[in-house]
Image: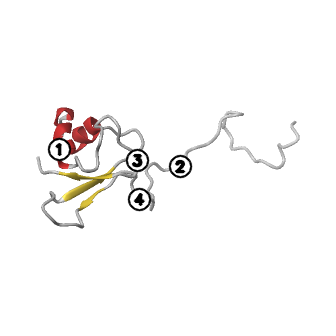
Amino acid sequence: MGIFDGIFKRNKGEKQGQPDFSSVRSGGSSTAPSPATVTADPIGASSAGRTYTVVKGDSLSRIAQHQYGDANKWRRIYEANRDLIKDPDLIYPGQSFRIPEA
C-alpha cells in the first residue's frame, strides 16, 4: 500500500503508472495572430495587392514557394521590393514586402 493510494482513487482495470487520456479531445484554437500574414496592401499605389511580413527562418525562395508554389520565382518578389532589399540573401523578420501577382 502506497502513501498516495487513499488520495488518488484508481479505476479498476487501470494499469498502475499509466495515465488516463480517455477524456482528452483533439483540436484546438488560438486567438494569437499568425506569425506570417498576407494582407491587403494599405498603400494601394502601383504595388500589387498583397504584402507579406517576414518571420524568422524565411528566405525569398521560401516566401515564393508559399505564395506561388515555386521557389524559383523569388526574383519576382525581389524585383518588386528592390527599394527594401539590398541583398536578396539578407532579409529580416518584421520586414514587409509587396507580393506581385503570379
Q: Secondary structure at mark 1?
A: helix
Among numbered discs 2 and 1, the one appearing first in the sequence: 2
In the picture, measured across the screen, residue 94 lies left or right of residue 63, that is: right
Say if mark 4 contacts mark 3, CB within 8 Å: no
Residue bearing the label numbered 3: 93
Question: Residue 39's x, y, as percent?
Answer: 26, 60
Mark 2 Cα within 10 Å, few/some/many (few <14, many 20+)? Answer: few
In terms of image quadrants, where is residue 73? Answer: top left
Say if mark 2 contacts mark 1, CB within 8 Å: no
* Distance between the alpha carbons at the discs numbered 2 and 3: 36 Å
- The circle drawn on residue 79 is 1
Which mark is in front, 2 or 4? 4
Q: Secondary structure at mark 3?
A: loop
Mark 3 Cα within 10 Å, few/some/many (few <14, many 20+)? Answer: few
Residue bearing the label numbered 4: 33
**Callout 4, which amino acid?**
Pro
Which mark is in front, 2 or 3? 3
* Distance between the alpha carbons at the discs numbered 3 and 1: 19 Å
- Pick the quarter of the image with the N terminus: top right
Mark 4 Cα within 10 Å, few/some/many (few <14, many 20+)? Answer: few
Which mark is in front, 3 or 1? 1
Question: Residue 70's x, y, as percent?
Answer: 18, 35
Among numbered discs 1 and 4, the one appearing first in the sequence: 4
Among numbered discs 2 and 4, the one appearing first in the sequence: 2
**Callout 3, which amino acid?**
Pro
